[in-house]
Image: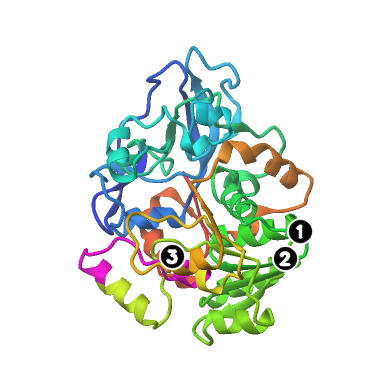
Amino acid sequence: MKAICWHGKSDLRLDTVPDPTIQEPTDAIIKITATAICGSDLHLFDGYQPTMEAGDIMGHEPMGIVVEVGSAVKRLKKGDRVVVPFTISCGHCWFCEKTLFSCCDTTNPNHKLAEEAMGHSPAGLLGFSHMLGGYAGGQAEYLRVPHADVGPIKIESGLPDEKVLFLSDIFPTGYMAAENANIQPGDTVAIWGCGPVAQFAIQSAWMLGAGRVIAIDNVPERLEMARTFGRAETINFDDVTPYDRLQELTNGRGPDSCIDAVGAEAHGGGSLGAVVDKAKAAVGLATDRPTALRQAIIACRKGGTVSVPGVYVGLLDKVPVGALMNKGLTLKSGQTHVQRYMKPLLEKIESGQIDPSFVITHSLPLEQGPDAYPIFRDKEDGCIKVVLKP
């Protein structure tokens, strides 16, 4: 089959690789009908994520048609149309029973690597590094889906792929980010970033009762999407310091909740911290540029909540923990417990409450995927979200 494979920093290739096979009785094989490039993929593309190996298949936002199931699979059958979550979860460990699916205790075969870096291992993830399991990803013609009775959700309506694909990751991620932000009716929510996850965090903040949503970015197309589809007020951080503008908009109190939907590769304008972050990352002295997280902590009102769906890789410099503590902030983060959200969010799509396809700006054949990565990363051609079709 054809698959987009990692061969080093900024080096992705469309390779011919062996088709996946059933390895465990709980596996399924799906033929991919749509897959997407995620902001998290850029951390691999840009070389910030350790433990990648040449030939690793990229991608963790897939859906398709079941073509084979293992002997122990009961929920799925050949011909079912499914969306596959990026989190691989067993469904029966202590964490899965508490619906903390991204914390699954059993699905990372390389858990010792993760334990050395983080103390404990999260779940295995599709299309990420070997520290997180080394599982083949979904930017390919076919995909092996472990624990197929626990992860995929069947799509039994005639909704097109584009409306349901993002149940695999970014819609649940944006929703969990808003849920983690502890939004109370009428609250003011500030969201750093206007990329795909942030767009769904904006939508989800309204669903959870926000009275005001303020989105921060410097890319005109993203800011326009936040205004048009998200009904958000916007701040361009090239024009004004986010803290100063947020103080003005909230009469000096600060937002009730702040969401960092940017993560490890924040730009942050020309601030000294952002310049230092970029320089250290360029020479391998740092893996993360936490400008958005710093700003969110400083801007958030006393007693407020900072939610962090943005992916971070390693250690962060100059994060204002003193402000976090002295202001009495709550900080909540985590990889998304996707399986918890797929069914209720599918119901929102089916009822017409939201059409997630609004974020798609580029739909391309799989073969153009390697060329699409730098376009997506550099936000060229108005690119906000890329969907690939094998």
- Total residue callouts: 3
Residue 362 x/y as whole percent: 52, 60
From this viewpoint, is residue 193 visible?
Answer: no
**Residue bounds of the magenta highlight:** 280-296
Q: Which mark is residue 321?
A: 3
- Left or right side of 190 for 318: left
- Left or right side of 388 for 21: left
Residue 105 x/y as whole percent: 43, 30
Marks 3 and 1: which is nearer the front? Answer: 3
Q: Earlier in the sequence, mark 3 or mark 2?
A: 2
Residue 11 x/y as whole percent: 26, 56
Q: Which mark is residue 187?
A: 2
- Left or right side of 136 for 304: right
Marks 2 and 1: which is nearer the front? Answer: 2
Residue 25 x/y as whole percent: 44, 15
- Which corner quadrant of the image does residue 56 belong to? top left
Q: Earlier in the sequence, mark 3 or mark 1?
A: 1
SS category of the residue bearing label 2: loop
SS category of the residue bearing label 3: helix
